[in-house]
Amino acid sequence: MEHAIRISCTRRNLKVVRDFVSDFLLRYHLSDLLVNQIILAVDEVVANLIIHGNGEDESQFLDVRVAVVNKEFGIEIEDTNLTSYSPASYHEPDLQEYVRIGKKGGVGMMLVNRIMDRVEFTTHAGHNLCRLYKKLG
């Protein structure tokens, strides 16, 4: 992928990733709505990997790579935590039930899945890789 950064697993770096993605997308002259949706989805996945996957351990790192190929934005987020967050077990929540019981949280991945065109999580040789894709036009 074209552009990349490495961040330590601390919430302070969420803004670093948001700015990185925003700055990258500027060159494509997209609507504010589309840019903000992509940033929201990326922020949610990165937050989950930092908080749930790596326990906010600043000695752990995420590698973040972005590119646009054939008018499709792609981002890869990779870590090496063997006990990482496992989105494969994710089941979309019943929003009406969440509202009924007043539950907060737990809907981020639902938003990611609705915003992005494709969401992929794989683990291979000690590396966890999340890929998100969104058509730009």
Image: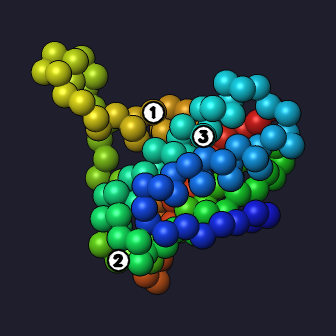
Q: Which mark is residue 39?
A: 3
Residue 76's spot in the image, x, y percent?
Answer: 60, 60
Residue 40's spot in the image, x, y percent?
Answer: 54, 37
Residue 122's spot in the image, x, y percent?
Answer: 47, 65
15 or 31: which is nearer to us? 15
Report crowding for label 2: few under 14, some 14 to 19, many 20 or more residues within 10 A (C-alpha). Answer: some
Q: CA distance from mark 3 to mark 2?
A: 26 Å
Indicate which label's residue lies in the foreground, 3 or 2: 3
Q: Which mark is residue 45?
A: none
Q: CA distance from mark 3 to mark 1?
A: 12 Å
Mark nearer the N terminus (2 vs 1):
2
Q: To which residue does mark 2 refer?
A: 82
Write the residue at 76% across / 56% down. 67
Q: Residue furthest left?
A: 101
Q: Could you tell whether 73 is left or right of 102 in the image?
A: right
48 or 87: which is nearer to us? 48
51 or 124: which is nearer to us? 51
Residue 21 position (above or below residue 82): above
Which amino acid type is shown beneath numbered disc 1?
A: Leu
Which amino acid type is shown beneath numbered disc 2?
A: Leu
Report crowding for label 3: few under 14, some 14 to 19, many 20 or more residues within 10 A (C-alpha). Answer: some
Mark nearer the N terminus (3 vs 1):
3
The secondary structure type at the circle numbered 2 is: loop
Q: CA distance from mark 2 to mark 1?
A: 26 Å
Q: Quadrant of the C terminus?
A: top right
Q: Residue furthest front?
A: 12
The secondary structure type at the circle numbered 1 is: helix
Q: To which residue does mark 1 refer?
A: 111
Which amino acid type is shown beneath numbered disc 3?
A: Ile
The secondary structure type at the circle numbered 3 is: helix
Mark nearer the N terminus (3 vs 2):
3
Residue 97's spot in the image, x, y percent?
Answer: 18, 21
